[in-house]
Amino acid sequence: HAPDALGVGWYLPPSEAMIRVQAERNKSSIYSETLKLASKKPFKWMIIQIKKLIAILNGYEVPNNTNFYLQQRFTYLKYSPLITFSVISPLGILGFILCFRDEKLSLLRLLSYGIICSILAIYMLSRFRIVFIPIMIIFAAIALVKLWQFFINGSHRKLAAYLAILLFLSIITYPRTIPKIRPNDHYNLALQYIKTKEYNKAYNQLKAALRIAPDYPPANEMIQRFKKQVP
């Protein structure tokens, strides 16, 4: 929440005050410092919240200590025609819009608000929105049913309008064009291989990290240790 924070992914803001309170592990100090920083620079604070909201609804899977895109390389499921969050999200948002005044779904909408606010209260990682996905699937299904009803009832103008909205939502929620696999993702996987004593696989992951970032210090240091210690 600090003005210099990203809000997406784990990131330690360079603010001296935030570094100090996070090092102390004192939650009350973190919250009070966050409020001070937000009150000093409210516009930047709001921008961070908007970035978080976009990340929650975006198809990109924000990595933490594990990376969804790297894991795909080790499973046959990557070849399967699975529906990803990139499909669910725009349909879910459209479904939310189409049934916004439906009182029967008020509790489900309230639950959605609660989940989103709980993520906005901290920072965005893909695993944080897992509980949000079933709700988005329900709203996505509602959107498909509504669009089909417009079609069979001959409401072509409504259908065209909502399809245009769906296209717009698909564009803004499409995964960001950034490197999906980072050097530290390969490094973290290498550490897991070391725990299971699969040293050749660990070494290959370290080399993969260096292909992305040749100067990545942890991988370079680990490779030097490999050359000295691993038989």
Image (cartoon, rainbow, N blue to C red):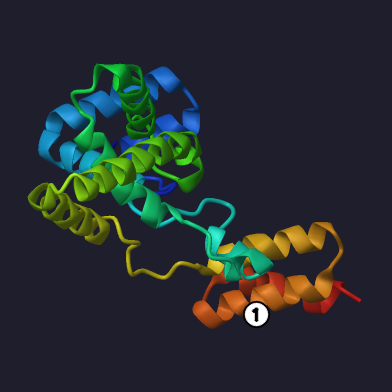
The location of residue 204, given as percent across then percent down, is 71, 78
Q: Is residue 97 left or right of residue 217?
A: left
Say which residue appears at 52% left-offset and 51% top-offset. 64
| Residue receiving disc 1 | 207
Quadrant, the N terminus: top left
Relative to residue 198, is residue 196 depicted above or below?
above
Between 102 and 150, the one lying in front of the other is 150
Q: Secondary structure at mark 1?
A: helix
Residue under the image location 42 percent in, 33 percent down: 135
Residue lying furthest right: 231
Task: Check the image and report above or below for 105 versus 84.
Answer: above
Near-viewer residue (49 or 116): 116
User: Does residue 17 appear to the left or right of 223 in the view shown?
Assistant: left
- The reply, left or right, for residue 47 in relation to residue 57 is left
Query: Where the C terminus falls, by quadrant?
Result: bottom right
- Answer above or below: position of 42 versus 184: above
Tell me residue 43's x, y (percent).
11, 38
Q: Quadrant of residue 138?
A: top left
| Residue 110 appears anywhere in the view | yes
Is 126 rendered above or below residue 23? Answer: below
Q: Residue at x 28, y 47 (%)?
A: 148
Quadrant of the image occupied by residue 163: bottom left
- The residue positioned 19% from the left and 44% from the top of the image is 153
Q: Amino acid at mark 1?
A: Lys
Q: Position of residue 21 (x, y in %)?
A: 41, 30
